Amino acid sequence: MTAMTETFTLNIAPDNITPENTPINSRVTTKKYDIAFLHTSALCVKNFDVIMKELAPELSVKHEVRPHFLSRAHANGIDRVLEGDVTAAIEALSQKSKVVVVTCSYIGQVAENIGMLNGSHIESIDRAMADFAVERANNILVLTALQSTLKPTRELLKSSMNHFGVKPTVTLQYVDDAWEHFLSGNEKGYYEDIAKVLREKEQDYDLIMLAQSSMAGVVDGVELSIPVISSPRIGVERAIQFLAPR
């Protein structure tokens, strides 16, 4: 198993700070769904259903799966055509859902660029996790199993750092063999590769962030002395908060 690492911090630019997230207003209460999730893998549906049933079983949920978005992103990056198609999918979901959450880290930036649409809040599942990490830690390790996730994860963390006016040291580590296990359906091997890195690195950092939602399950099988966070639960909690009355 090989790995590639990158470390960065940030010079704060206060005039780029974005406003605090606030709940959406009551004019969207007639929409059919409370929360819609846009996935690029059908494997995510069950995991997010479990979280929703635990945290807010009374809410109505819509799942949309578009695997070709991820394959196209890997082939050509987020070009204008793909960005337009992702935006169109988000637009359609926003017509019938009060909150739309994009669960794929790679295309999450499209959601971040939209913010609000048709009275619905649009967000990347990773935003809440990035905010949590930079607020609470000074030395952060971010693990990703996909090299293509490095750039959007880096930009997401930088914007969270800028928002909160903090400058933690962030190290991005790409573990390249793990994703092959995921693609072949070997979830156990996928989690084991990630868990190995977690154990090797726990003494070097004060928080570890798992950059992809597919990595979340590894936390259940590993006991560490530092926090290890992933996006699904934190992101769903944020989405539910947007539905709270003002």
Image: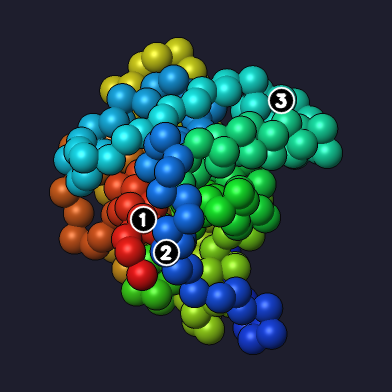
Q: Secondary structure at mark 3?
A: helix
The residue sitting at 20% across, 54% down in the picture is 224
Q: Name the one closer to the observer, 7 or 211.
A: 211
Q: Is residue 181 at all visible to an observer of this figure?
A: no
Q: Secondary structure at mark 1?
A: loop
Q: Is residue 223 above or below residue 137?
A: above
Residue at point 47%, 50% (across, down): 28
Q: Give me the residue at 51% from left, 23% from top.
A: 65
Quadrant assignment, res 107: top right
Q: 92 left or right of 210?
A: right
Taking 70 as reference, is 244 above or below it?
Answer: below
Residue 140, position in %: x, y? Answer: 42, 65
Instruction: Give the quarter of the image for residue 36.
Output: top left
The spot of residue 81 in percent (x, y) is: 82, 32
Q: How is colour applied across the structure in the image?
A: rainbow
Say the numbered circle drawn on residue 23. 2
In the image, which disc is placed on residue 55?
none
Name the residue tied to disc 1: 243
Depth check: give the residue in front, 139 or 65.
65
Q: Label 2 vs label 1: CA separation?
A: 6 Å
For disc 1, the neighbor class at 10 Å (few under 14, some 14 to 19, many from 20) is many
Q: Could you tell me residue 102's position as x and y percent?
A: 52, 41
Amino acid under disc 3: Arg
Three-letter amino acid code at disc 2? Pro
Residue 10 percent across, percent down from the top left: 62, 76
Q: Is residue 75 visible?
A: yes
Q: Is residue 176 left or right of residue 33?
A: right
Q: Are marks 1 and 3 in contact (CB under 8 Å)?
A: no
Q: CA distance from mark 3 to mark 2?
A: 33 Å
Q: Could you tell which of marks 1 and 3 lies nearer the N-terminus?
A: 3
- Residue designated by label 3: 72
Q: Residues within 10 Å of mark 3 (few under 14, many from 20)?
A: some
